[in-house]
Each structure stands twice: as C-alpha cells, then as structure tokens.
C-alpha cells in the first residue's frame, strides 16, 4: 500500500547540534545528578520514573514532565528555598540520557531494537546496517516504515531502498523514537 504524500511519515529535521544542557527537555528514565552547594547530604543521582517524577530529600516527589534542565533546576531551588534553605544554589545535570530505539524486523540478519545515538540522527539504511544488514532473501524494494504521529495514529510508507542507496535522498529518512522498519522477503 502506498500512502499519499500528506500521509507519509514526516522525517525528523536534520540534527545540527544537540540541545544545550539548559534547553534539554528531561525525558522519562534520564539519570540526573542534583547538587546543592554546601549541602552534601542533599546530593543525589536519581533516574526519572516513567512519569518523569523524582523524589528528593525534604521536598519529596517532584513532577518534571516537559521541563527543561533549567526549569527543573529553578523549580528545585524554589522548593528548597520555600522552607528549608536560605538562597540555595542548585546544580542539575543529566548524567545519562534515556535510551531511544527503533525496531528493525523481517529479513535482516539480526532483527530487534536499534539504539538511536544521542548525538546524531539515525537514518533508515544505518538502522538496517546496525541490524546486521539485509539478509540474502530481503526484498529491498518494499521496505515498510511505520511511525506513530503526535495524534496517536500510525502511518506506514513503502520505501525502495535501492533508490536511496548511494544517493543523497536517503537523508530524508531520518528515524525517530518508536519507528518500526519491516523488511519483507522476496517472493522467489
């Protein structure tokens, strides 16, 4: 099935540089380090829960969903400043970013999840390469890329890998977290 151009998954914009530390939006399962100047007992390394919640001494659970590092840092500072410390100096940094993956299935040598590097975009053919490459029975002319949109609906587009191998048009197929690539078998 071939989708209309408007229904095709939109490629993620090419990554120029990773977001600056303060602009990074915290994600579930990020590991963060929180330091309070001259208060070593309050220092913590914590992993955000699936709901982006962390629990800190004295102030308890804090929801960080959709917050940037700078916003979370200010929120923690304000909570400590409210009742516990006078003008606290807070430093929050991401120690380990949550792992993002795409899934490669079908006629590849090692089907399964492929990690998206945090510092560069992952392209369609790169993901297939990380999954061991095409098997000898792979139908490279009918790859299926399935992506869930912001509205929760999935869309699938059929891609001819032979058209993008060795050309710059392959740049348009930048993958995003949750994409599923299916490589069918050729009919012999």
Image: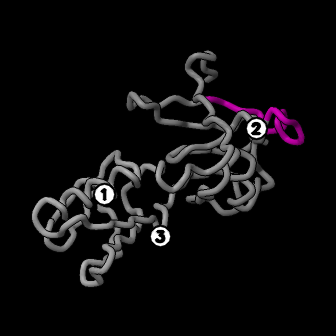
Figure check: 4 above or below 71? above
Q: Quadrant of the N terminus?
A: top right
Please tell me whether residue 166 belongs to the stretch shown in magenta.
Answer: yes
Q: Which mark is residue 95?
A: 3
- For the view shown, which residue lies furthest in the bottom direction? 41
Report which residue position mark 2 lands on: 171
Colour pattern of the rendering: one colour
Please report the residue visible at 75 percent of the width from the left and 47 percent of the height from the top: 125
In whole angstroms, how far apart are the C-alphas of marks 3 and 2?
30 Å
Q: SS of the residue at dot 1?
A: loop
Instruction: Give the camera-side residue of 9 and 97.
Output: 97
Q: Position of residue 59 (x, y in %)?
A: 15, 66
Q: Position of residue 58 (x, y in %)?
A: 13, 71
Instruction: Give the camera-side residue of 175 and 47.
Output: 47
- Tell me which corner region of the image, top left, top right, bottom left or bottom right, holds residue 111: bottom right
Few, some or many residues within 10 Å of mark 1 (<14, 14–19, 20+): few
Few, some or many residues within 10 Å of mark 3 (<14, 14–19, 20+): some
Lower position in the chain sequence, tag 1 or tag 3 = 1
Figure check: 149 above or below 108? above
Instruction: Give the camera-side residue of 176 and 27.
Output: 27
Instruction: Give the camera-side residue of 153 and 183.
Output: 153
Please report the residue visible at 56 percent of the width from the left and 49 percent of the height from the top: 19
- Tell me which corner region of the image, top left, top right, bottom left or bottom right, holds residue 47: bottom left
Report which residue position mark 1 lands on: 50
Lower position in the chain sequence, tag 3 or tag 2 = 3
């Amino acid at each position: 099935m071939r989708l209309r151009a408007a229904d095709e998954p939109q490629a993620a914009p090419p990554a120029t540089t990773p977001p600056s530390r303060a602009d990074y939006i915290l994600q579930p399962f990020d590991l963060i380090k929180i330091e309070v100047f001259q208060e070593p007992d309050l220092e913590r390394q914590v992993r955000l829960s699936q709901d982006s919640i962390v629990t800190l001494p004295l102030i308890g659970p804090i929801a960080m969903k959709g917050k940037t590092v700078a916003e979370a840092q200010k929120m923690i500072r304000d909570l400590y400043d409210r009742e516990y410390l006078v003008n606290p100096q807070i430093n929050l940094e991401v120690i380990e970013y949550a792992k993002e993956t795409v899934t490669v299935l079908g006629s590849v040598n090692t089907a399964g999840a492929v990690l998206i590097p945090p510092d560069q975009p992952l392209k369609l053919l790169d993901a297939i390469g990380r999954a061991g490459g095409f098997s000898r029975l792979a139908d490279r002319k009918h790859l299926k890329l399935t992506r869930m949109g912001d509205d929760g609906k999935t869309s699938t587009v059929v891609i001819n890998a032979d058209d993008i191998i060795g050309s710059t048009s392959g740049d348009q197929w930048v993958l995003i977290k949750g994409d599923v690539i299916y490589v069918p078998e050729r009919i012999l």
